[in-house]
Image (spheres, rainbow, N blue to C red):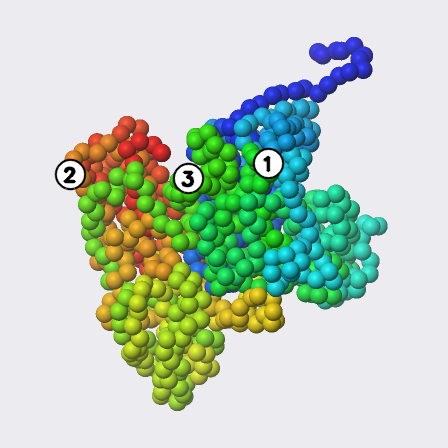
């Protein structure tokens, strides 16, 4: 029993904790930052003021994670973010294809607590910043309401990933809030005062059908006049959760200090919407439905943005400007919302897409005036317009990974964040990120410590793609469709495809490419051919005269024709995709982007894939065969398709696909890294949406590693991840290493992007 005398000066339980890095904010940015830093070998304290990790992606808010893939609704092919966030998304797909947000919580928590270098403090809110001079943070104070403990946390480095920037603000870091004028950065898309300067918060609800009549009596504070919402006719009994992202409010208020007021207004709207659905009589199908869940905290979009040594702006995104210190990328549209949100007469969003990915420089990821403060998530150094793209969670998580690795290198090299951006150091940061699976557009990994680079590499066979067999369905050419093919320099191969015409007609075929290397927007037409068709099934022989100067993806485009059906193939191949000139209104894709004059955004067409089980490849014969899948790809340092597949694929009749590395003398190998194909084109939305697959069909599920005596030294039988790291308990001494792949899907050949070997664990 505890019994204390009356006293006037009791204080909470107190703990002092130190680490190499304190990360404040446990959204995806902070979580991925902490995991990356911890895996790189430094001690991390991760402080989260909520009971779960994930921020807007958690079960408390329930927004799906998206980034550069944009629901597969833009022209960014194979663009899902890599590294830790990919590992999380792939694991969630494996465990949770139904999109249950509670399961996603468990995936994130498991990843964090599985790292011995992370001290996780949940339900712990930072409230004070302690300085060690005007330009340096000494520590922060935080309080956990659940265990009544006051924490004093100290570290040489801090990362603010808190969303509102509680640490950066308290430390005196320079920041902005609201929109810049067009004149400041020359941004044509800078909003007018009438549109508003801030994006608001959103709050979601879930409904379910109980199978029996259910009454709903609205609370007294529910909105009664639904017509106050100009788009109220869009509400229906089927959509819920983040499908109603446009239930948004607060852009005219202080999105930091007025959040509670904004939340109450959103509650009024949500309960008013449900009252309308249940009790208006317009939705008889809702009679048996109940309100299953309503968010208790709103999902925030925008508040403070802190200034680094560079401020990313619209031109960086639209023009895809390159930066010598690039450490991450984005690809979501520039997506601004009217400040009045759900009460606005304007559309809920105003999205303008770029033609491809854009680089995010390291100079945006630390404070320009607080020397030991790194920035991650939506508070990084960007303009309001650029924020419209960089703010989404996939991109925020990717930035967080870059910050986590930067903190680890700062610790190892004894320097502050700005110094790491120096020309003689930034390449080290980029290389270490690439080693963790972080794709950076325009960069390839060449690690001098990689023993595989000094080995003789042989493969058991190489795919020569001569045919995509005509074993799939005949599907109508209702919209223009295209087959993406990786071409090498030289003449375009002769192609034959099969169609069926209902009557005599003409099929228009165009050969296109992208105007910029690494992009996948088919905005340059090389040739157009008019192919006369007779009624019935027939081959279409395509002999293009164009010559290709560098490796690229060409688009064989069939223009829409209501009289034609196209023969498809069941064969799916890493780095081969069909795309369609159709619409995806969810991301403002209506087939073609036509921006108003003067906003600094280009017009172009969208050619996007369809999700499996749709999205089959054209049935084709190719002469000469495509030789884009050779063993040399395994050491080119790019672990996803870009301007070529970048993968090794064996021949179709290879019963034991094998990669062999041979050295003239024995090597001591402690670590082997393999890069598989997790379908980089799939967005893997985390909640609400359901997916037909738990494991991507391109990912090799089983493989065996053998030494120079042909002894099995490692066997994996249940793989679903892109990046596999094999660590041997004792260094493997061998002159040869062979990796035997075992594909499980008869219609999907095995594929491998990369193999790397290290003498010591790195």
Residue located 66% across and 55% down the image = 180
Residue wearing tag 2: 664
| Residue 371 image position (x, y, % from top left) | 56, 35
Disc 3 crowd, CA 10 A, few/some/many (<14, 14-19, 20+)? some
Q: CA distance from mark 1 to mark 2?
A: 52 Å
Whichever of callouts 1 and 2 sits on the residue coming sooner in the sequence is 1
Q: Nearer the viewer, residue 661 or 424?
A: 424
Residue wearing tag 3: 425
**Would residue 186 be found to the left or right of residue 477 on screen?**
right
Does the CB distance between marks 1 and 2 fall below 8 Å?
no
| Residue 591 image position (x, y, % from top left) | 53, 71
SS category of the residue bearing label 3: helix
Residue located 63% across and 24% down the image = 152
Between disc 1 and disc 2, the foreground one is: 1
User: Residue 537, located in which quarter of the rendered image?
Assistant: bottom left
Q: Residue furthest bottom?
A: 504
SS category of the residue bearing label 2: strand
Image: 369 above or below 202: above
Residue located 51% across and 53% down the image = 330
SS category of the residue bearing label 1: loop
Label for residue 370? 1
**Would residue 327 be found to the left or right of residue 632 on screen?**
right
| Residue 669 image position (x, y, % from top left) | 26, 34
């Amino acid at each position: 029993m505890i019994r204390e005398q009356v006293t006037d000066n009791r204080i909470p339980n107190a703990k002092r904790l130190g680490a190499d890095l304190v990360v404040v904010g446990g959204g995806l940015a902070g979580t991925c930052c902490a995991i990356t830093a911890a895996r790189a070998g430094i001690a991390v304290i991760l402080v989260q003021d909520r009971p779960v990790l994930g921020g807007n992606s958690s079960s408390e808010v329930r927004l799906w994670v998206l980034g550069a893939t944009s629901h597969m609704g833009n022209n960014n092919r194979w663009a899902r973010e890599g590294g830790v966030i990919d590992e999380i998304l792939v694991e969630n797909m494996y465990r949770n294809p139904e999109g249950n947000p509670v399961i996603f919580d468990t995936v994130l928590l498991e990843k964090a607590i599985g790292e011995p270098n992370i001290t996780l403090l949940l339900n712990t809110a930072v409230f004070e910043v302690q300085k060690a001079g005007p330009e340096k943070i000494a520590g922060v104070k935080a309080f956990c309401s659940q265990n009544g403990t006051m924490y004093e946390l100290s570290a040489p480095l801090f990362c603010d990933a808190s969303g509102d920037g509680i640490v950066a603000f308290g430390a005196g870091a320079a920041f902005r809030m609201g929109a810049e004028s067009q004149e400041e950065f020359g941004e044509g898309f800078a909003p007018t005062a009438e549109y508003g300067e801030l994006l608001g918060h959103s709050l979601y609800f879930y409904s379910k059908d109980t199978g029996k009549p259910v009454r709903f009596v609205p609370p007294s504070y529910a909105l009664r006049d639904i017509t106050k919402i100009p788009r109220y006719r869009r509400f229906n009994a089927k959509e819920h959760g983040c499908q109603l992202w446009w239930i948004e409010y607060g852009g005219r208020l202080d999105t930091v200090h007025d959040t509670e007021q904004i939340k109450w207004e959103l509650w009024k709207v949500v309960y008013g919407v449900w009252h309308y659905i249940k009790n208006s009589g317009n939705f008889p199908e809702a009679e048996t439905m109940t309100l299953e869940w309503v968010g208790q905290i709103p999902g925030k979009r925008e508040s403070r943005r802190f200034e680094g040594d560079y401020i990313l702006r619209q031109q960086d995104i639209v023009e895809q400007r390159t930066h010598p210190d690039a450490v991450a990328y984005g690809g979501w549209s520039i997506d601004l919302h009217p400040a009045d949100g759900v009460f606005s007469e304007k559309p809920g969003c105003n999205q303008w897409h770029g033609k491809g990915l854009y680089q995010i420089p390291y100079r945006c990821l630390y404070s320009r005036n607080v020397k030991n403060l790194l920035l991650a998530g939506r508070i990084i150094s960007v303009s309001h317009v650029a924020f419209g793209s960089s703010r989404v969670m996939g991109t925020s998580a990717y930035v967080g990974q870059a910050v986590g690795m930067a903190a680890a290198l700062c610790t190892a090299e004894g320097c502050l964040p700005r110094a790491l951006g120096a020309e003689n150091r930034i390449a080290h940061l980029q290389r270490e990120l690439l080693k963790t699976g972080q794709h950076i557009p325009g960069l390839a990994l060449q690690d001098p410590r990689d023993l595989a680079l000094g080995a003789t590499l042989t493969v058991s066979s190489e795919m020569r793609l001569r045919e995509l067999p005509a074993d799939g369905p005949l599907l109508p050419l209702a919209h223009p469709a295209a087959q993406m093919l990786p071409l090498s320099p030289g003449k375009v191969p002769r192609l034959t495809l099969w169609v069926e015409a209902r009557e005599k007609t003409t099929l228009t075929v165009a050969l296109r490419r992208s105007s910029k290397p690494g992009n996948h927007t088919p905005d340059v037409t090389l040739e157009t051919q008019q192919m006369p068709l007779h009624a019935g099934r027939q081959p279409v022989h395509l002999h293009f005269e164009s010559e290709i100067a560098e490796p690229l993806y060409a688009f064989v485009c069939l223009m829409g024709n209501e009289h034609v059906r196209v023969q498809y193939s069941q064969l799916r191949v890493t780095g081969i995709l069909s795309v369609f000139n159709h619409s995806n209104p969810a991301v403002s894709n209506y087939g073609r982007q036509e921006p108003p004059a003067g906003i600094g955004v280009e017009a172009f067409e969208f050619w996007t894939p369809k999700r499996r089980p749709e999205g089959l490849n054209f049935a084709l014969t190719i002469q000469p065969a495509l030789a884009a899948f050779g063993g040399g790809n395994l050491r080119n340092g790019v672990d996803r398709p870009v301007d070529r597949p970048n993968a090794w694929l064996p021949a179709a009749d290879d019963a034991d696909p094998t990669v062999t590395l041979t050295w003239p003398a024995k090597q001591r190998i402690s670590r082997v890294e393999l890069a598989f194909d997790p379908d980089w084109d799939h967005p893997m939305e985390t909640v609400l949406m359901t997916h037909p697959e738990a494991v991507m069909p391109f990912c090799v599920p089983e493989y065996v590693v053998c030494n120079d005596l042909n002894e099995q030294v490692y066997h994996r039988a249940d793989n679903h991840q892109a990046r596999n790291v094999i660590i041997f308990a004792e260094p493997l001494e061998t002159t040869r290493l062979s990796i035997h792949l075992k594909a499980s899907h008869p219609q999907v050949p095995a594929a491998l992007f990369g193999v790397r070997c290290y003498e010591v664990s790195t």
